[in-house]
Amino acid sequence: MQALLDTIARMPLPTDGAQRVFHGRGGLHPGEESWTLDWFAPVWLLTRFEPASDEELAAVGQALAARWAELAPGQALNWVFQERDEVRATNRLMAGAVPEPHLVEEAGARYQLHLLRGQNHGLFLDMAEGRRWVREWAAAAPGGRVLNLFAYTCAFSVAAMQGGAARVDNYDMARGALAIGKHNHALNGVDQGVGFLPHDIFNSWGRIARHGPYELVVMDPPSYQKGSFVATKDYARLVRRLPDLLVPGGHALLCLNSPKLGEAFLREVVAAEVPGYEVLGRLPNPPAFADADPDRALKVLLLRRPG
């Protein structure tokens, strides 16, 4: 874990409210692929995707305390540790406190987080470029309608409404996540013209299509969620619905965060299910999420329906 400790020792004072500082999962620090370190002002979040020893946590804690004393003299050090695997996570407050409510800002938008419970915290930092693109798309074509599938806490929706979208419909089975999403819209003063619909997407196509068609469809499913979504068999079921959901000339963002499935998988699904749709390209990931193998990192493809 020397690369993690070295990164902490030389890191600058964070200037963004939410950012990744160490991305071991990118494979650029051999042997440290299980570690990440994020800043969610005013709290540091250390994550390990396998068990960590008390000695390792003590070393990170000492490194954070020493560097924080240099960067922010007199300010309390707040940090949380999450140990997780593919199905569960445990969260521990290691020092200081987590504000309640805990609000962070990204690109002028505020989001509510919950670092001490659950596996995910309310905002996926690697999707920052996707949110930026959606905001800019909405600003360039004000009055557009957006469908946000697997909406989670609706960050894409906040970005779209801030950009100038007229309507966003957010679908997700998790009522708790949608409730946070509704609060996120209120925090940003963009809560008019937004729907929060707690439905099983695969059992709701009729309902979803009745509210469309849309100028933009965002599909950001989990890569694997037992009992609800498996990308290798279910992504095609999503993409083949695009003709019913998109206006001619409309756009779609297809998101996939699986180290086991590369960009070619998404392109093959598009070619098979919606031939003729143009793949305009892949959105870049934030520089902090650089990966030795881009196919293992987050994939976000931009499509355009002809017409």
Image: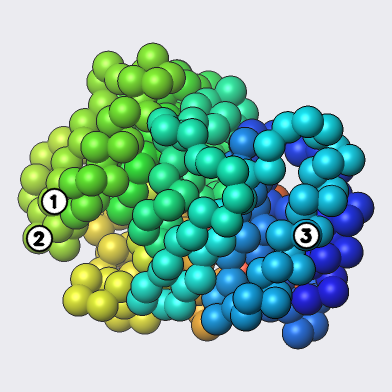
Q: CA distance from mark 2 to mark 1?
A: 8 Å
Q: Which mark is residue 141?
A: none
Question: Residue 94 occupies which quadrant of the picture?
Answer: bottom right
Viewed as shown, does residue 275 lie left or right of 94?
left
The local crowd at label 1, few if under 14, some if 14 to 19, many if 20 or more residues have their Cα within 10 Å, is some
The residue at which mark 2 appears reads as: 203
Q: CA distance from mark 3 to mark 1?
A: 46 Å
Residue at horizontal 28 percent and vertical 63 percent from the top:
238
The local crowd at label 3, few if under 14, some if 14 to 19, many if 20 or more residues have their Cα within 10 Å, is few
Element marked by disc 1:
loop
Residue at horizontal 55 percent and vertical 81 percent from the top:
51
Q: Position of residue 217 (x, y in %)?
A: 36, 45
Residue at horizontal 45 percent and vertical 61 percent from the top:
91
CB under 8 Å between discs 2 and 1 = yes
The residue at which mark 3 appears reads as: 62
> Does the image show residue 114?
yes
Most foreground residue, 58 or 276: 58
